[in-house]
Amino acid sequence: MNTPGDRVAVYPGSFDPLTNGHVDIILRGARLFDRIVVAILRNAEKNPLFSPEERVAMAAEVFREQPNVGVDSFDGLLVDYAHRQRASAIVRGLRAISDFEFELQMALMNRRLGPDIETVFMMPAEQYTYVSSRLIKEVFALGGPITGLVPAVVEQRLREKRETR
Ligand code: PNS
Protein backbone atom coordinates (compact mmCIF):
# COMPACT_ATOMS: atom_id res chain seq x y z
CA MET A 1 0.00 0.00 0.00
CA ASN A 2 1.06 3.58 -0.59
CA THR A 3 1.44 5.92 2.31
CA PRO A 4 0.72 9.64 1.79
CA GLY A 5 3.73 11.42 0.31
CA ASP A 6 5.08 8.28 -1.34
CA ARG A 7 6.55 8.78 -4.82
CA VAL A 8 4.87 6.09 -6.89
CA ALA A 9 5.69 5.11 -10.48
CA VAL A 10 3.96 2.71 -12.82
CA TYR A 11 5.99 0.70 -15.31
CA PRO A 12 3.51 -0.37 -17.99
CA GLY A 13 3.96 -2.89 -20.76
CA SER A 14 2.90 -6.13 -22.36
CA PHE A 15 5.63 -8.21 -20.68
CA ASP A 16 4.92 -11.23 -22.90
CA PRO A 17 7.20 -12.36 -21.36
CA LEU A 18 9.19 -10.38 -18.78
CA THR A 19 12.87 -10.15 -19.82
CA ASN A 20 16.01 -9.32 -17.87
CA GLY A 21 15.95 -5.95 -19.63
CA HIS A 22 12.58 -5.25 -17.95
CA VAL A 23 13.94 -6.52 -14.62
CA ASP A 24 16.92 -4.17 -14.93
CA ILE A 25 14.63 -1.16 -15.48
CA ILE A 26 12.30 -2.17 -12.62
CA LEU A 27 15.22 -2.43 -10.16
CA ARG A 28 16.51 0.98 -11.28
CA GLY A 29 13.00 2.40 -10.81
CA ALA A 30 12.74 0.79 -7.38
CA ARG A 31 15.82 2.77 -6.32
CA LEU A 32 14.39 6.06 -7.62
CA PHE A 33 10.81 5.78 -6.35
CA ASP A 34 9.26 4.77 -3.05
CA ARG A 35 7.18 2.25 -4.96
CA ILE A 36 7.04 0.99 -8.54
CA VAL A 37 4.10 -0.95 -9.92
CA VAL A 38 4.70 -3.26 -12.87
CA ALA A 39 1.46 -2.75 -14.80
CA ILE A 40 0.73 -5.51 -17.29
CA LEU A 41 -1.65 -4.52 -20.11
CA ARG A 42 -4.42 -7.10 -20.31
CA ASN A 43 -5.33 -6.68 -23.97
CA ALA A 44 -1.91 -5.84 -25.41
CA GLU A 45 -1.92 -8.40 -28.20
CA LYS A 46 -4.68 -10.37 -29.79
CA ASN A 47 -2.71 -13.57 -29.43
CA PRO A 48 -0.27 -13.34 -26.51
CA LEU A 49 1.85 -16.36 -25.59
CA PHE A 50 1.09 -15.95 -21.89
CA SER A 51 -2.27 -14.95 -20.38
CA PRO A 52 -2.33 -11.80 -18.22
CA GLU A 53 -2.64 -14.05 -15.14
CA GLU A 54 0.45 -16.04 -16.15
CA ARG A 55 2.43 -12.84 -16.80
CA VAL A 56 1.39 -11.37 -13.43
CA ALA A 57 2.31 -14.63 -11.64
CA MET A 58 5.78 -14.75 -13.24
CA ALA A 59 6.57 -11.12 -12.40
CA ALA A 60 5.23 -11.53 -8.85
CA GLU A 61 7.55 -14.51 -8.40
CA VAL A 62 10.56 -12.57 -9.70
CA PHE A 63 9.95 -9.61 -7.37
CA ARG A 64 8.58 -11.45 -4.33
CA GLU A 65 11.49 -10.27 -2.20
CA GLN A 66 11.39 -6.65 -3.38
CA PRO A 67 9.02 -4.92 -0.94
CA ASN A 68 8.59 -1.75 -3.02
CA VAL A 69 7.85 -3.51 -6.33
CA GLY A 70 4.20 -4.30 -6.97
CA VAL A 71 2.76 -6.31 -9.87
CA ASP A 72 -0.70 -5.72 -11.30
CA SER A 73 -2.62 -5.81 -14.57
CA PHE A 74 -4.69 -3.07 -16.13
CA ASP A 75 -7.17 -2.30 -18.90
CA GLY A 76 -8.09 1.00 -20.49
CA LEU A 77 -6.10 4.19 -20.47
CA LEU A 78 -2.73 4.06 -18.75
CA VAL A 79 -3.11 7.54 -17.24
CA ASP A 80 -6.43 6.52 -15.63
CA TYR A 81 -4.68 3.51 -14.11
CA ALA A 82 -1.77 5.69 -12.97
CA HIS A 83 -4.20 8.06 -11.26
CA ARG A 84 -5.89 5.14 -9.50
CA GLN A 85 -2.46 4.09 -8.22
CA ARG A 86 -1.74 7.70 -7.15
CA ALA A 87 1.39 7.55 -9.29
CA SER A 88 3.28 10.69 -10.28
CA ALA A 89 5.37 9.00 -12.97
CA ILE A 90 5.29 6.49 -15.80
CA VAL A 91 8.60 4.67 -16.26
CA ARG A 92 9.63 3.43 -19.70
CA GLY A 93 12.88 1.86 -20.86
CA LEU A 94 14.74 3.21 -23.89
CA ARG A 95 17.09 0.76 -25.60
CA ALA A 96 17.97 2.41 -28.87
CA ILE A 97 17.11 5.38 -31.07
CA SER A 98 14.54 3.17 -32.78
CA ASP A 99 12.49 3.09 -29.56
CA PHE A 100 12.47 6.85 -29.31
CA GLU A 101 9.87 7.87 -31.89
CA PHE A 102 7.03 5.73 -30.51
CA GLU A 103 8.02 6.47 -26.92
CA LEU A 104 7.96 10.22 -27.61
CA GLN A 105 4.48 9.93 -29.13
CA MET A 106 3.22 7.97 -26.14
CA ALA A 107 4.85 10.28 -23.61
CA LEU A 108 3.33 13.37 -25.23
CA MET A 109 -0.10 11.77 -25.60
CA ASN A 110 0.01 10.66 -21.98
CA ARG A 111 1.05 14.19 -20.96
CA ARG A 112 -1.96 15.59 -22.78
CA LEU A 113 -4.25 13.03 -21.14
CA GLY A 114 -2.72 13.36 -17.68
CA PRO A 115 -0.59 16.53 -17.35
CA ASP A 116 0.21 15.75 -13.71
CA ILE A 117 1.98 12.50 -14.62
CA GLU A 118 5.56 12.66 -15.87
CA THR A 119 7.11 10.02 -18.14
CA VAL A 120 10.61 9.05 -17.01
CA PHE A 121 12.89 7.17 -19.39
CA MET A 122 15.63 4.88 -18.21
CA MET A 123 18.33 3.04 -20.12
CA PRO A 124 18.90 -0.63 -19.31
CA ALA A 125 22.38 -2.08 -18.79
CA GLU A 126 24.21 -2.42 -22.12
CA GLN A 127 23.95 -6.20 -22.17
CA TYR A 128 20.17 -5.96 -22.50
CA THR A 129 19.92 -3.24 -25.14
CA TYR A 130 19.10 -5.78 -27.87
CA VAL A 131 16.72 -7.91 -25.79
CA SER A 132 12.98 -7.79 -26.54
CA SER A 133 10.08 -10.08 -25.64
CA ARG A 134 9.45 -10.65 -29.35
CA LEU A 135 13.02 -11.83 -30.02
CA ILE A 136 13.03 -14.01 -26.90
CA LYS A 137 9.90 -15.81 -28.12
CA GLU A 138 11.34 -16.23 -31.60
CA VAL A 139 14.75 -17.53 -30.47
CA PHE A 140 13.17 -19.88 -27.93
CA ALA A 141 10.63 -21.23 -30.45
CA LEU A 142 13.50 -22.02 -32.84
CA GLY A 143 15.48 -23.84 -30.15
CA GLY A 144 18.06 -21.13 -29.42
CA PRO A 145 19.45 -20.48 -25.91
CA ILE A 146 17.88 -17.66 -23.89
CA THR A 147 19.54 -18.34 -20.53
CA GLY A 148 20.64 -15.08 -18.92
CA LEU A 149 18.23 -13.00 -21.00
CA VAL A 150 15.08 -13.80 -19.01
CA PRO A 151 14.52 -14.65 -15.32
CA ALA A 152 14.81 -18.40 -14.55
CA VAL A 153 11.09 -18.66 -13.81
CA VAL A 154 10.27 -17.24 -17.25
CA GLU A 155 12.60 -19.72 -18.97
CA GLN A 156 10.92 -22.53 -17.02
CA ARG A 157 7.39 -21.35 -17.99
CA LEU A 158 8.47 -21.09 -21.64
CA ARG A 159 9.63 -24.73 -21.49
CA GLU A 160 6.37 -25.83 -19.89
CA LYS A 161 4.40 -23.91 -22.52
CA ARG A 162 6.31 -25.65 -25.30
CA GLU A 163 5.65 -29.07 -23.75
CA THR A 164 1.90 -28.48 -23.51
CA ARG A 165 1.56 -27.21 -27.09
O1 PNS B 1 5.30 -3.31 -23.79
P1 PNS B 1 4.59 -2.41 -24.74
O2 PNS B 1 3.70 -3.23 -25.66
O3 PNS B 1 5.53 -1.50 -25.48
O4 PNS B 1 3.64 -1.46 -23.86
C1 PNS B 1 2.74 -0.55 -24.47
C2 PNS B 1 1.84 0.11 -23.42
C3 PNS B 1 1.14 -0.94 -22.56
C4 PNS B 1 2.67 1.00 -22.51
C5 PNS B 1 0.79 0.98 -24.16
O5 PNS B 1 0.19 0.22 -25.17
C6 PNS B 1 -0.31 1.52 -23.25
O6 PNS B 1 -0.06 2.34 -22.39
N1 PNS B 1 -1.56 1.03 -23.44
C7 PNS B 1 -2.69 1.41 -22.63
C8 PNS B 1 -3.71 2.20 -23.43
C9 PNS B 1 -3.35 3.67 -23.47
O7 PNS B 1 -3.31 4.35 -22.47
N2 PNS B 1 -3.08 4.15 -24.68
C10 PNS B 1 -2.64 5.51 -24.92
C11 PNS B 1 -1.18 5.66 -24.53
S1 PNS B 1 -0.40 6.81 -25.52
Image: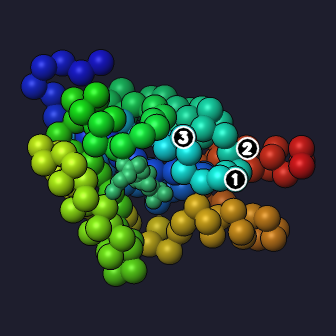
Query: From the viewer's perspective, is residue 162 above or below residue 123?
Result: above
Q: Which mark is residue 157?
A: 2
Proximity of marks 3 and 2: CB atoms separated by less than 8 Å = no
Q: Secondary structure at mark 2?
A: helix
- Where does label 3 land, which residue? 42
Name the image quarter holding residue 4: top left
- Where does label 1 land, which residue? 47
* Residue 131, position as x, y percentages in the image: 53, 68
* Residue 147, position as x, y percentages in the image: 66, 60
Dividing the image into 4 quarters, which one contains the N terminus? top left
Q: Calculate the distance from the C-alpha at mark 1 to the C-alpha at mark 3.
A: 11 Å
Proximity of marks 1 and 3: CB atoms separated by less than 8 Å = no
Q: Does the beta carbon at disc 2 come under 8 Å from ligand 1?
A: no
Amino acid type of disc 1? Asn
Residue 35 visible, this orientation? no
Residues 37 and 31: in front is 37
Residue shown at 28%/29% (left/top)?
85
Which residue sits furthest bottom? 97
| Among the two numbered marks 1 and 2 on one chain, the one whose residue lies closer to the N terminus | 1
* Residue 140, position as x, y percentages in the image: 75, 64
> Viewer-nearest of labels 1 and 2?
1
Q: Secondary structure at mark 3?
A: loop
Q: Does the beta carbon at disc 1 come under 8 Å from ligand 1?
A: no
